[in-house]
Amino acid sequence: MELAAIDELAPPPDAAVLAVGFGPGVGVAELTKRLPRGFVGGVDPSAAMVHQAHRRNQSAVESGRVTLERSTADSIPWPDGNFTGALAVNCVQLWDPIDASVREVARVLAPAGTKLETAGLAHGLAVAREIYADRAYTDAGRLAERSCPGAVLHDAGDAAARVLAMVLEGVIITISGKRLEADIDSICVHGDSPNAVAMAKAVRTRLEEAGIALAPFAPV
């Protein structure tokens, strides 16, 4: 089952994959084969399983390519957006509390593709991936709470410069300066802010000055 799940995940060679409930480490061993330039982090609540998985993957652990921790799905010891994929085989039914565990796994995943995007592509639909010009992102790729300092951008020039950098680099730039890879097709400026028109004009000007053409969705 683990091999089938890894096949379905199909991580690129440089991916960082989280293994939740890795058991004796069979799936971890397979992941290390497929991720020659990547990283595997894992959590399992069983001391016996952690010990077995360490023995099975000793060289990868010693080289730093694998880190295995005794912990649960609701307490993952890595920062926001640390992983590009996650694997959990025959263990989700044991996650307790389930809601907190799902949120915790989502927290450590980078926003390479939303569920809506994935579903649309799976059904052969055209999708447009949008970023926000006037909102800051957390390191997990989510919008920062409006109550947080710097969560809302008000300066049109600063917003336009940040948007240009994100488009040119193909990343989301977080409030801490971290870069998260992302495809960008559309840019949103909230119309309820007093300087929305000025910000939209500034963003358009910076993009066009950089040689980036703007187009309606229909022909895309």
Image: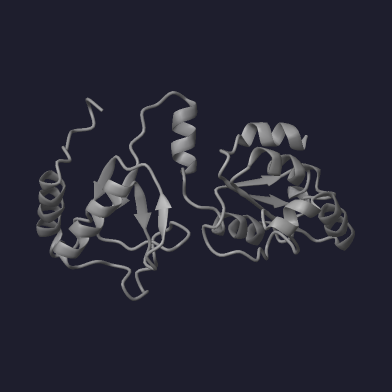
Q: Provide residue 190's location: percent of width, then percent of height.
A: 23, 56
Q: Position of residue 163 (x, y in %)?
A: 24, 54
Counting every numbered tag in the picture gives: 0
Residue under the point 47% across and 25% down: 123
Q: Nearer the viewer, residue 96 or 48?
A: 48
Note whether 200 is above or below 115 in the view shown.
Answer: below
Up the image or down, 43 lies above or below 154; here it is above
Does residue 126 appear left or right of residue 191 in this picture? right
Residue 169, percent across and down?
A: 32, 48
* Closer to the camera in the image, 136 or 37: 37
Quarter containing the N terminus: top right
Q: Determine if residue 50 is in view.
A: yes
Question: Image check: 163 left or right of 115?
Answer: left
Q: Is residue 67 visible?
A: no
Going by the picture, which residue comes out furthest to the right?
48
Q: Residue at x 57, y 45 (%)?
A: 15
Question: Residue 214 or 193: which is nearer the viewer?
Answer: 214
Task: Name the residue at 17% across, 34% down.
Answer: 215
Relative horizontal placement of residue 36, taking residue 118 as reference (left or right):
right
Q: Position of residue 116 (x, y in %)?
A: 45, 39
Q: Quadrant of the C terminus?
A: top left
Asked whether 173 or 98 is in front, the reply is 173
